Image: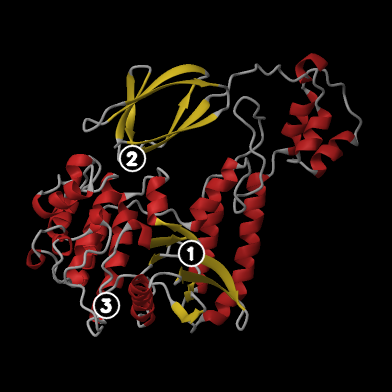
Amino acid sequence: MGTVYKAVDPLIERAVAIKTINLNLSKEERAEFEERFYREAKSAGRLSHANIVTIYDVGEADDIAYIAMEYLEGESLRETLDSGVVLPIEMIGRIAARVASALNYAHENHVVHRDIKPANIMITTVREVKIMDFGIAQIPTGSRTQLGTVLGSPKYMAPEQVAGQSTDGRTDIFALGVVLYEMLTGTTPFNGDNLSAIMYKVLNEEPAPPSAVNARVPPAFDRIISRALAKRPEDRYQTAREFARDLRKLDAASPRKAPDSAESAKRARTLQAGRMPEEEPTTLFLGSSKSREGVTIPPPGKPERIREHISSLLRGPLHGRTPLLLVIPILIVAAFVAYSRGHQPDRARLEATVAQAPGNAPQPERAPAKVIAAPLAKPAVKSAVRVPAAESAPAPVRATQEKATVIFAISPWGEVYVDGERVGVSPPLATLQLGPGKHRVEVRNQAFSPYRDTVNLESGQTLKIRHKFR
């Protein structure tokens, strides 16, 4: 219909999207397109919903009509699906539920979109869902009826829309059912070589259940899709609210893995970086092959038990606490002394161990004092023990070939074979580690012709294999 520009509103300094349409047309064409253009502004402008694009202004200058609307960072659902990205089942259900919720709000305000399709659904960078382009929406109070006029995208049109009959909110429900089907399976339910073939299937044929096309789709979606794509409007969901409620029930019933706490995630990152967690004691623990007699490892949980005991005392009732307050400092000091003694190595035995180390000569009287000053300090022990040069030299590191990483983006799904052996189903299989060299990769889906390729991988290489079965 026109061109969309990114612009800046100078009054409040915000980024906006300006949709324009060239009105330099014949008189009849100008009247038709201008009417549709202003109908979009009137439709979306009367709606205020988190999942519907916001309209700021509408006007006309010379032969250009324009609408200033909310500028969104992200990409359309059409671009997401065409990129080969496989959306998780949970995310698909949530996207459809939010669109259904926004449509229900529009229908309650007597606005029917009539062109719901992936290109008109925006996924922002912060994972918000927005419905765009009410360009052919029908307002009941409008002066012109749409009977006998076929508008919209054929693959997403409801049977009554194809037949040129009157439409209502259930028309949008059918279109959203088609979008949901495509997100789940990677293909639309009604396909054909030409417009007539597509329209015939919309009017007469029942699509295969999504779980039959994509094995990872839960069968519960089959019932939802079947009701949304019913040929007769009275057999469908009567409101988009019912559609959204069933999707949310399905999402609530799906099993979820309990998310890790922030503390667990922090601990995992710390350990992966080769550091100990901050709350761990800083005592040096020697490995079993290098442990020295006389170095006592404290029993696990001892500091925690002391802290827990003191905390329980502090949580006691207020009355009778005055004598207790005098005891608490004594308990703390005693606990600290006991804990410290449990960590102190026996001085004589440690000195004997250091003196008996191979190649060590008797040290002057002051030498042990240096070791005693920091009994667990790693540099002091190392300085007292001489290691022969041959033993101190680092062992040669043997060069190893790093494996290559293969990333899969298969839609809707496929069984992955490498060198004739089955390695899994993608999705959920997303990455695979393979050795350098040539490999035969084959992806099979019983409903389509298999995908085959021979890849020559190098050490450390990352290769993405993207394929959409059609």
Q: Residues within 10 Å of mark 1 (few under 14, many from 20)?
A: few
User: What residue is drawn where x is 26% and y is 80%?
Assistant: 139
Mark 1 vs mark 2: in front:
1
Residue wearing tag 1: 3
Looking at numbered disc 2 in the image, what kind of residue is underneath it? Ser
- Judge by depth and name the residue closer to the eye, 385 or 222: 222
Count of picture labels = 3
Residue wearing tag 2: 411
Q: Earlier in the sequence, mark 3 or mark 2?
A: 3
Q: Is residue 306 above or below residue 9?
A: above
Looking at numbered disc 3 in the image, what kind of residue is underneath it? Val
Badge 3 marks a residue whose secondary structure is loop
Give the side of residue 126 with respect to residue 230, left or right: right
Residue wearing tag 3: 111
Badge 1 marks a residue whose secondary structure is strand
Which quadrant holds residue 440? Answer: top left
Residue 266 image point, x, y percent: 55, 52
Residue 44 image point, x, y percent: 36, 77
